[in-house]
Image (tube, rainbow, N blue to C red):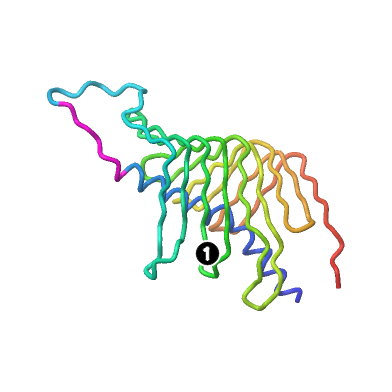
Amino acid sequence: MKRLRWAWDRLSIYLPIVLMGMFALGSWWLVRNVPIIVAPGQAAPPRHEADYFMRRFSVKSFDVAGKLKSELWGAEAHHYPDTDMLEIAQVRMRAFDEQGRLTVATARRAVSNADGSEVQLMGDARVVRESSTGPGGEALPRMEFRGEFLHAFVKQDRVRSHLPVELTRGSDRFTADALDYDHRSQVLDLRGRVRGQLAPRQR
């Protein structure tokens, strides 16, 4: 039982990377598949003005069997050619893993670069995985990451936040002034005023 709980604790740390990767894939798809109108004549130097926008859009991805894998929804999105950045307002992301467990991320605003290698969630950023059952039939508690800012570096498998964050797993709760998670080294670094509250385990 202790080994099972240890394994789940290690796996639960991967949640931000998995979700940010799915978000990056959706934003990359948007940037690459929206048509760009090219005006005739010499191209003017790009200004920080949106060259296209979308309102109340949704992008879905499916597996080979036609089952929904992820959905990216936004109230409005703008693409800026000078920085090649995509900004999305009121973003909501749903992603299912191979076991069908649902993870949801929301924020008031998201910014992604052109290739989706960097994604920033800003303003009441939340990443939630609801309670479910593990492969061995064990109960997996609800888990939530929350803060005003989460920055994912997808190619480096890294998530950072320089602002206060809150992590909740079941009845356990941790807060810190900053977060740095490196998936490759599997190191989670909580900095500043780190506080934790562990609920008694039921036998």
Badge 1 density bin: few <14, some 14–19, many ≥20, Cα 10 Å: few
User: Looking at the image, which residue is at 40% across and 61% down?
Assistant: 62
Q: Which residue is mark 1?
A: 97
Left-right relation of 147 to 102: right
In this view of the protein, which residue sits in the foreground, 125 or 132?
Answer: 132
Based on the picture, tell me whether residue 33 belongs to the magenta stretch. Answer: yes
User: Looking at the image, which residue is at 12% across and 23% down?
Assistant: 41
In this view of the protein, which residue sits in the foreground, 13 or 93?
Answer: 93
Secondary structure under the numbered disc 1 in the rendered image: loop
Q: Amino acid at mark 1?
A: Asp
Return the x and y of residue 64 as percentages of the image width and height. 37, 68
Q: Eyeballing the image, is 180 above or below 88?
A: below
Residue farthest toward the left in the current orientation of the protein: 41
User: Looking at the image, which residue is at 41% across and 39% down?
Assistant: 113
Q: Give the position of the C terminus as an image quadrant.
A: bottom right
In this view of the protein, which residue sits in the foreground, 146 or 89?
Answer: 89
Residue stretch rendered in magenta on the structure: 32-39
